[in-house]
Amino acid sequence: KRTFHSPVSCKLAVSWEQGVEKYLEKKKAGGESGVVENVKPCPNPDCNIPTTKTSGCMHLVCAHCKCEWCWQCGNYGGGNTNRQRPHHVYNCNEPRNENWNSIAPFEDDGRFNFYYERFLNHTEAQKLADSKRKSAKKKTENILSNFHTITSSEAEFVAEAYELLIVCRNVLAWTYVSAYFIRVETDRIRFQYIQGEFERYVEDFSRTVEENDVMYLLQHRLDITNTTKALTKFLGNIMRQ
């Protein structure tokens, strides 16, 4: 059964999945797994502490050296590094090689790797959000059974926030597939701008929902509800691209 793949057409989704299959077979033949791990070393050469990503947000702060870094590409700075703070993830959706766009699909590993890793990053972030959603559900039920200051309908928005985040991560993953197949440069640049803005909203929403406890979410229900409304509207726009 194929997963929800908006904003990509079914035809392109099939083409992508076939390309991924060939890519993984090639990696396997070379002794590589082709799987993106949830553990990476801090990119600061003076640190390199193994870091496990425990939330969907792609912007990390090293617990050891305090530098900030991008999970997508490893750009780092801030802290004690004497480097500028790195860009955020929504500035990390531009292919590094301007010639990649002229190469036929699946004929260049570098271009495919760029989009495939970002596709996997958001797919893994979606799984993390789903795991946290289940944990948040149990905590919310516990609060409802022990405190009588909120109702079940008032707490329902916590589950709705996580559901929205999960959908957004899935759509973000497939926007990288969509960008991969766009051949006209001006169209790709336009799409990447919209994608970057959507990614910024999702990353901010991810930090709010995943990096705070349920009680915080309940206490800030109004603000989070307003954010979900705005994000839902943005989600609808990008799905129509």
Image: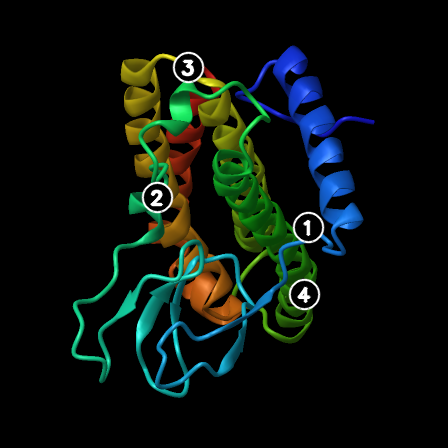
**Residue nearer the viewer, 28 or 124:** 28
In the picture shown, does residue 133 fall above or below 51? above
Residue identifier under label 2: 201
In whole angstroms, how far apart are the C-alphas of marks 1 and 4?
29 Å
Residue at 34% x, 46% y: name it: 92
In the picture, residue 11 is in which quadrant? top right
Amino acid type assigned to the residue bearing label 2 in the image = Tyr
Label 4: which residue?
A: 135
* Residue 63: percent from left, percent from top: 41, 84
Distance of label 2 from label 4 (alpha carbons):
23 Å
What is the spatial separation of the Cα atoms under label 3 and label 1, in whole angstroms? 25 Å
| Mark 1 or 2, nearer chain start | 1
User: Of the residues under marks 3 and 2, which one precedes in the sequence?
Assistant: 3
Q: Residues within 10 Å of mark 4 (few under 14, many from 20)?
A: few
Q: Nearer the viewer, mark 2 or mark 4?
A: 2
Question: Left or right: where does residue 144 sit relative to residue 113?
Answer: right
Residue 179 relative to residue 151: left or right = left
Asked if marks 3 and 1 touch (Cβ < 8 Å), the reply is no
Query: Which residue carries the number 1 mark?
Result: 34
Helix, strand or loop at label 3? It is loop
Residue placed at 43% from the left, 75% from the top? 42
Q: Between marks 3 and 2, how big is the CA–CA gap?
A: 26 Å
The dot on residue 188 is none
Q: Which mark is residue 183?
A: 3
Query: Percent from the top left, x then y, of residue 93?
Result: 37, 39
| Left or right: 44 in relation to 137 | left
Determine the CA span between mark 3 and mark 4.
42 Å
Q: Which amino acid type is shown beneath numbered disc 1?
A: Gly
**Whole-percent x and y of residue 54?**
56, 68
